[in-house]
Image (cartoon, grey):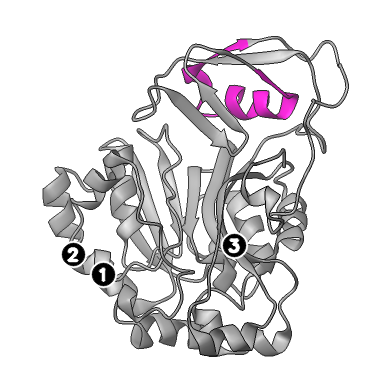
Amino acid sequence: MKHEQVQDYYGKVLQGSADLQTDACCTPAEMPGYVKAALSNIHDEVLTRYYGCGLVLPGALEGARILDLGCGAGRDVYALAQMVGPKGQVVGVDMTAEQLAIARTHQGWHAEKFGFDVVDFREGLIEALGELGLEPASFDVIVSNCVINLATDKAAVLKGAFDLLKPGGEIYFSDVYADRRVPQALAEDEVLYGECLSGALYWNDFLKLAREAGFDDPRRVEHRRLGIENPVLAEKLGQLRFISATCRLFKLDGLEPQCEDYGQAVIYKGTVPHMPHALVLDDHHVIETGKVFPVCGNTWKMLHDTRFAAHFEFIGDFETHYGVFEGCGEASLFDAEATQSGTCC
């Protein structure tokens, strides 16, 4: 699929989220109250041009510098602007001029609504982030909402994101994945590609590309099975199955291939805004406030060497190794039992 065809689908064919033919590019209705409050402050035209598949608000964002890959009309940019506040910055990148025109048209409206203006929009390809004049190692967080599957060179996207992140930064993103490699013939179908299906990576290929880009321990935050209700598209896809998953990839030195046990633990202070009772790192680390929570060495670094450090107390070091952390292992996301409970990535 060529860039021009994707631009045409999102710039001309789709005039609003109601034009989508599947639920792949739709965020589930349930969302936290603070997210609903943030979305209520966003212009209606921006909201109606939203085509994401998840929530990309990872927490502890005040004052952060954030990059949104494939920002479209800017819904997530304007939501994130409210999270980072007047001392932060949110940069949105998109290749579709029609979408960016909507985002920019309402920039002043949002600045008046929020009381500050910390957003910037750039037109360009997410496969060529190095050509956008963005300073390397300058972002705390990179987000993306159901867009990387549309990229023609997904490895380049991940490598470009790695280069733009500060040490200890992360890419936190939602996307669509397949249970097998999608046949090339389906990848040439404009509707299937535009609906975020036939450009989806096979899950194991994604894990490989993430590690090759420098993200050594990919973490899955949540996922859901996608139903294909359109009978014509379902017939084309045959036995292919898809999930929407939110993942986080940290730029950290020294992460190990397996979850290793060093006898470490953390205590969450309950101080991340909107997360007083627990912090969700991923689908198997829901860390309750005030409770001693045993962690592997990789998880310890993801909290100790990142923006989350101030929100935790840390127990232990790397002096003594006790073997593989109990419960470490990977199950297929497409197995029935794997959709009910998470395991270590």
- Among numbered discs 1 and 3, the one appearing first in the sequence: 1
> Considering depth in this image, is 340 or 153 the residue closer to the camera?
340
- Horizontal relation, residue 179 to residue 220: left or right: right
Question: Could one spot residue 130 in this view of the protein?
Answer: no
Q: Determine if the magenta segment contains residue 311.
A: yes
Most foreground residue, 259 or 163: 259
Alpha carbon separation for disc pair 1 and 3: 23 Å
Residue that mark 2 sits on: 44
The x, y position of residue 72, in whole percent, is 37, 68
- Quarter of the image for the N terminus: give it: bottom right
Q: Nearer the viewer, mark 1 or mark 3?
A: 3
- Residue at 57% over, 83% down: 234
Q: Amino acid at mark 2?
A: Asp
Q: Which mark is residue 254?
A: none
Q: Do the CB atoms of the residues marked 1 and 3 lie less than 8 Å apart?
A: no
Give residue 243's mark.
Answer: 3
Q: Which residue is mark 1?
A: 48
Does the magenta run of residues contain 308? yes
